[in-house]
Amino acid sequence: MNEKNKLPTMYWQDNRLCILDQRFLPLKVEYRSCKNCSQIIDSIKEMSVRGAPAIGITAAYGMAIAALNALEEGYNKDKLLTSLDEAASNLIMARPTAVNLFWAVQRMKNLIQKQKESSPQQIFESLLTEAKKIHDEDVNNNRMIGYYGSELVPEKASVLTHCNAGALATCGYGTALGVVRAAVKQGKDIHVFVDETRPLLQGSRITAFELLNEDISATLVTDSAAGSLLSGNKVDLILVGADRIAANGDVANKIGTYTLAVLADYHNVPFYVAAPVSTIDMTVESGESIIIEKRCSSEITYLDGHLTAPEGITAFNPAFDITPAKLITAIITERGVVCRPDREKLNKLF
Amino acid sequence: MNEKNKLPTMYWQDNRLCILDQRFLPLKVEYRSCKNCSQIIDSIKEMSVRGAPAIGITAAYGMAIAALNALEEGYNKDKLLTSLDEAASNLIMARPTAVNLFWAVQRMKNLIQKQKESSPQQIFESLLTEAKKIHDEDVNNNRMIGYYGSELVPEKASVLTHCNAGALATCGYGTALGVVRAAVKQGKDIHVFVDETRPLLQGSRITAFELLNEDISATLVTDSAAGSLLSGNKVDLILVGADRIAANGDVANKIGTYTLAVLADYHNVPFYVAAPVSTIDMTVESGESIIIEKRCSSEITYLDGHLTAPEGITAFNPAFDITPAKLITAIITERGVVCRPDREKLNKLF
């Protein structure tokens, strides 16, 4: 289902971006058709589309759609450029932690800079072409991540993963799950323990769904069970994605990742992070400077629209946490594996 | 609400045991009226009543009800004793991990042994009296646990707790939350972070409810957020209950407890276990020999009756994990605090 034509994370059709609404998975497969930039932003904010690489690509299409809307409004070039600036600002504010959003929007802005002589129509066309290019590059990057990462996976291995760093966090194949897919394809005997990943259950709803659909052996567990799996020697390696990697190798990823890294360290089990180079933010010194998105407390206090906690209780809901570089065995990118990451080693990727 | 007459965990009335059905908290306050032993067993299995001390007390009443049922059937003494034996066997099989169930049933069996000359009616009456005595002792034990434990709590402290070791896991006041209550009563400035505790959300549903009802400052978090709270220096101590403590000080408690103990160790934060002496099982050498209950996978794959994971995925749902004694700063009992627990120190409690 990670192949483009099976269940794509998103596709462009008739001047609209159709986004698989992942909030309803695995029970309902429904695409959200976006014809303007604010619909794109809502899809990112409401997490119809999630996963750092996927929201980057969505934002790139968002810029193309903003240009298209300006064309449809009959804006002149100045007004088009102003509206693209506005779209860029709004898109990067949709979610604060994943750097791929900034990265993709910046790439589109760089392209606009080069279009001084182009017509509005040409600007739209070049933005759309660039968005499609970012989309295609993502799948190729993931395959390279899979290729490099699979070398770290033993012939027989039990892997623990958290959240979803799969085909649906990207535009196919996946980062952490890309490594799993590549290892399975090489004939390795892989079992995956899937953390359900509260509060939004991306593990249960998306990772379990992806693995089941591909007949990759998987077991779902609560996030709390990881410690007991590790103490029972049931996990050979931990493999997660990333939302932003600081210059020193600190990693922002789904809340709970840091706990897994501490457990891995305590149990002497390797802890790998798989992410494209676009997730590395060399402008941020360390994890301390990464903004951690705080999401709505109702994600914790409500389940399926039903209150499960007492009315009036305060809930604290950070969407991500920071894992310091010292707890990371290696970062796996499309340009190779960086063992015991630090600024110098990460710099060499660029 | 932990006071006996506010919202009791259970009460005896008109020859029935009325058990607060904690599955429906905090949205619905409903008592399950049990008039025979199999209803009692169902209440334990289905977790209408939960928490090691509370299920011990429930089982004690279960033995009294079994005697009452035998009386109502007009059984002679031999038949009554046989049916009590049967009730005892069934009660201790209701849930395998919490030792208080065995402890309470054994106490009732010891009493039966002493009733060689008694009539069926006298046996019933003495069993009921004993159950009520265990019930009363529990509240007193918890107050003593609170008294001893509060000495370990600084004047201003942020406490992290997991699951519910409160008034409703016992018959009032609570073990871990008993310590919190005692510290608050002493005028200490206490804030409690409450792990929601998947899969059954005893933290959200019960601990948050207890603390909110008593105006104790509390914040609900996902289980995954503990690491990030600790790395942000937001937690001064971790305080949990126990379902069984082995002779060497290893502790079986709600799944996720072990992870918290590893995090506490990594962050140099004290990790305390509060439990009555009846939770200590000197017949079990170490945590390795404690049977860990595996519960139904649907507790993970369904929320409020709705499937949230793909149909066909395997889920692994251990209800407890083992925290080794070496990760435990102290065990707090009604007979005093045992620092860095081991067999010798625990033996002195008896």
Image (cartoon, coloured by chain):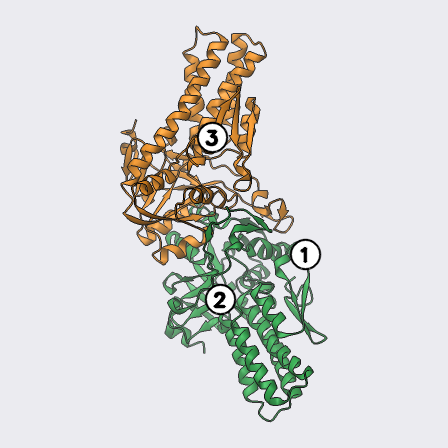
Chain colours: A green, B orange
**In 3D space, how far apart are the residues under numbered discs 2 and 3 (Cα atoms)?**
44 Å
According to the picture, the residue beneath numbered tag 2 turns out to be: A243
Q: Mark 2 is on which residue type?
A: Asp
Q: Residue furthest right?
A: A14
For the residues marked 3 and 1, what is the alpha-carbon distance in whole angstroms? 40 Å
In terms of depth relative to the viewer, which is nearer, B43 or A182? B43
Q: Secondary structure at mark 3?
A: helix
**Mark 3 sits on what residue?**
B55
In the rendered image, residues at marks 1 and 2 fall on the same chain: yes
Report if residue A87 is visible in the image: yes
Where residue A330 appears, x then y in whole percent? 43, 65
In the image, residue A176 above or below residue B147? below
Which amino acid lies under the numbered mark 1 shown in the image of this protein? Lys
At horizontal 30% and vertical 52% (from top left) the residue drawn is B268
Question: What residue does disc 1 label?
Answer: A28
Residue B329 x/y as whole percent: 30, 43
Q: Chain of mark 1?
A: A
- Seen in the image, is B139 located left or right of residue B122? left
**Residue nearer the viewer, A133 or A287:** A287
